[in-house]
Image (cartoon, rainbow, N blue to C red):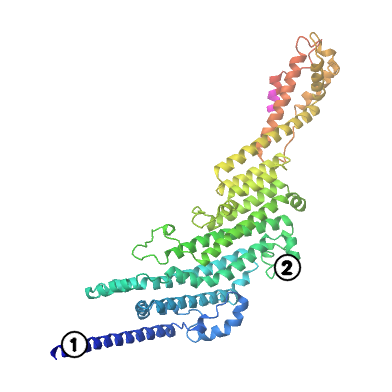
């Protein structure tokens, strides 16, 4: 009996303990569920606030009434209050406690991210169409492509700054709570047990929350940037044909006087569009790099993240908005490269339209794009294609080396005079100041110098023949050349046709008279003063050499002239007169 009573007591004790554990477990489950529903109500994470996330201005109108009802009921238009709510110590502690039930915790984070996605997208579309926080609607600047794109990117970057702080608050809440609780030794085992219970459970990271929150902005942002790029890459004639199909055909079509009478010619229009495209590429590079750095900081430990840390060395977290900007950069670079090639292919047509030489068109477009590059933050000294995930093709397309190779190669064959060469040298000088590599500049300097020497020699040869004809030595020089072709030993110079004593007297008299004011070309059309002086000196040297040859042959032993009084000046005296 004693044994049976003891067994019964043990059974009843075990049963009672099990009931107590089950009762506690049931109460704990209900407590977690109540906490779960409390957070959903407190943060307004119900279905109505997250179900209709607009991704364009068209379907924003259909869902705006439902969204406005929920948002206006608890927050103002300028501040949704979510960041302040999530920063409250009670809410942060509640999220940490909810981590004991991974399903509740994960679902709550997903709803927070979805709610943020809806709110961020709403703000962006509101800023585009109606204005936000006292600012004018961004689409009011749609006629100004660079400022239009810049304002959109700046707004999105400010949004990333806010959302990254919110996401970091979620990520660091657990660490902060543990650091506070571990100041008390009694809670250390409890915290360690929490870590053990969560082994094998994967929760949304701060980067995941940020990615979901910003994902809704990627599509409308990319569509508008693509419309701007496509409009600028389209030729004016194509734009006129397709303006009824493209609602944004005016983008890039009227800004900076594209349709103004002062710019009413195709060459200027093409250069303005190229400059817009290049400037937009620079903006995309700058903001893509800045946003990638902001995203990479999200989720990093506060203890190890310092101001001097290089965020490029941190693990990369894929983000839909950063990926969107990378795709926009690639598209814009391709459009810019295609437009540049079209510009070079139509140089003949643009020359006839603008009454400017191809070299001048080359210089103008290179200097304009170099100015854009110098003022754009995306092409600054810290520009690194690897840090912005730029492909090799896009990096080459946006480089100064590609600009010079494409434009100068297209125009070199059309250079007709020295002024064209000087114009190209000026363009190269501007590209060097903007950061053109020494290898590329050295290559084109060599090509240009060779072409310059070739043109100068040809021009000087023509002008020398003109000068000696005007001076009276042309006929004598021609007669000497013909005599050399038939000369035999013992032949007398004066016996050759055109070299008689009377012919020489008349030619020398005219030549000495011309020395008072030599008929050298002024080369006023040559802009470079160094080249002007060099050409005139070379012509004087050629005239002196011709006179010296005539003087030596006529006064030689085979001259056959009875009286040499017509040779009034020796070559040194003529040289002094020409130099004076």
Q: Marks 2/1: CA distance?
A: 94 Å
Q: Residues within 10 Å of mark 2 (few under 14, many from 20)?
A: few
Circle 2: element type: loop
Who's the residue at 43% across and 73% down the image?
166
Image quarter (top left, top right, bottom left or bottom right) of the N terminus: bottom left
Who's the residue at 80% across and 27% down the image?
469
Q: Which mark is residue 7?
A: 1
Q: Is residue 241 left or right of residue 88?
A: right
Residue 479: image quadrant is top right
Residue 199 among magenta residues: no
Secondary structure mostly seen in the magenta stretch: helix
Circle 1: element type: helix
Residue 517 can be seen, yes or no: no
Residue 579 among magenta residues: yes
Q: Residues within 10 Å of mark 1 (few under 14, many from 20)?
A: few
Residue carrying label 2? 243
Residue 188 locus on image (x, y percent): 25, 73
First to last magenta residue range: 575-580
Instruction: Point out the tag, 2 or 1, that comes first from the N-terminus.
Output: 1
Image quarter (top left, top right, bottom left or bottom right) of the C terminus: top right
Who's the residue at 15% across and 88% down the image?
3
Work out which residue is located at the far left of the displayed protein and give it.
Answer: 2
Of residues 115 and 368, which is closer to you in this image?
115
Residue 393 locus on image (x, y percent): 58, 52
């Amino acid at each position: 009996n004693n044994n049976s009573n003891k067994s019964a007591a043990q059974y009843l004790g075990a049963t009672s303990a099990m009931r107590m554990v089950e009762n506690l477990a049931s109460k704990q489950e209900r407590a977690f569920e109540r906490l779960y529903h409390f957070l959903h109500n407190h943060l307004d994470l119900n279905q109505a606030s997250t179900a209709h996330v607009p991704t364009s201005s068209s379907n924003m109108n259909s869902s705006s009434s439902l969204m406005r009802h929920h948002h206006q009921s608890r927050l103002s238009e300028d501040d949704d209050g979510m960041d302040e709510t999530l920063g409250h110590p009670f809410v942060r502690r509640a999220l940490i406690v909810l981590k004991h039930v991974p399903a509740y915790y994960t679902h709550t984070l997903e709803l927070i991210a979805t709610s943020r996605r809806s709110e961020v997208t709403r703000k962006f579309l509101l800023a585009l169409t109606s204005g936000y926080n006292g600012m004018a609607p961004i689409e009011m600047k749609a006629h100004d492509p660079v400022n239009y794109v810049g304002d959109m990117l700046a707004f999105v970057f400010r949004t990333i700054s806010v959302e990254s702080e919110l996401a970091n608050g979620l990520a660091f809440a657990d660490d902060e709570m543990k650091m506070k609780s571990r100041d008390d030794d009694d809670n250390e085992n409890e915290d360690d047990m929490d870590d053990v219970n969560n082994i094998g459970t994967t929760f949304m990271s701060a980067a995941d929350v940020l990615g979901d929150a910003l994902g809704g902005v990627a599509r409308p942002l990319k569509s508008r940037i693509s419309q701007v790029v496509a409009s600028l890459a389209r030729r004016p004639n194509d734009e006129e044909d397709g303006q009824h199909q493209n609602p944004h055909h005016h983008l890039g079509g009227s800004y900076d006087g594209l349709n103004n009478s002062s710019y009413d010619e195709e060459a200027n229009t093409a250069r303005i569009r190229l400059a817009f495209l290049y400037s937009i590429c620079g903006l995309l590079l700058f903001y893509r790099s800045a946003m990638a750095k902001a995203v990479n900081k999200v989720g990093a430990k506060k203890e190890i993240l310092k101001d001097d840390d290089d965020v490029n060395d941190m693990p990369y977290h894929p983000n839909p908005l950063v990926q969107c900007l990378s795709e926009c950069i690639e598209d814009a670079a391709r459009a810019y490269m295609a437009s540049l090639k079209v510009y070079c292919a139509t140089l003949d047509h643009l020359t006839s339209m603008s009454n400017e030489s191809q070299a001048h068109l080359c210089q103008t477009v290179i200097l304009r794009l170099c100015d854009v590059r110098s003022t754009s933050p995306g092409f600054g000294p810290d520009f690194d294609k690897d840090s912005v995930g730029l492909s090799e093709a896009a990096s080459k397309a946006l480089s100064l080396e590609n600009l010079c190779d494409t434009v100068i190669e297209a125009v070199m064959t059309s250079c007709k005079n020295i002024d064209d060469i000087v114009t190209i040298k000026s363009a190269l000088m501007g590209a060097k100041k903007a950061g053109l590599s020494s290898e590329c500049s050295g290559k084109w300097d060599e090509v240009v110098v060779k072409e310059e020497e070739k043109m100068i020699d040809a021009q000087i040869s023509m002008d020398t023949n003109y000068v000696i004809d005007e001076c009276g030595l042309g006929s004598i020089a021609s007669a000497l050349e013909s005599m050399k072709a038939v000369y035999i030993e013992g032949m007398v110079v004066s016996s050759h046709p055109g070299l008689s004593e009377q012919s020489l007297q008349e030619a020398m008299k005219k030549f000495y008279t011309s020395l008072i004011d030599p008929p050298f070309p002024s080369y006023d059309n040559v802009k470079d003063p160094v080249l002007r002086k060099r050409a005139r000196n070379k012509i004087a040297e050629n005239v002196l050499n011709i006179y010296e040859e005539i003087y030596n042959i006529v006064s030689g032993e085979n001259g056959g002239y009875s009286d040499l009084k017509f040779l009034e000046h020796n070559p040194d005296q003529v040289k002094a007169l020409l130099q004076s």
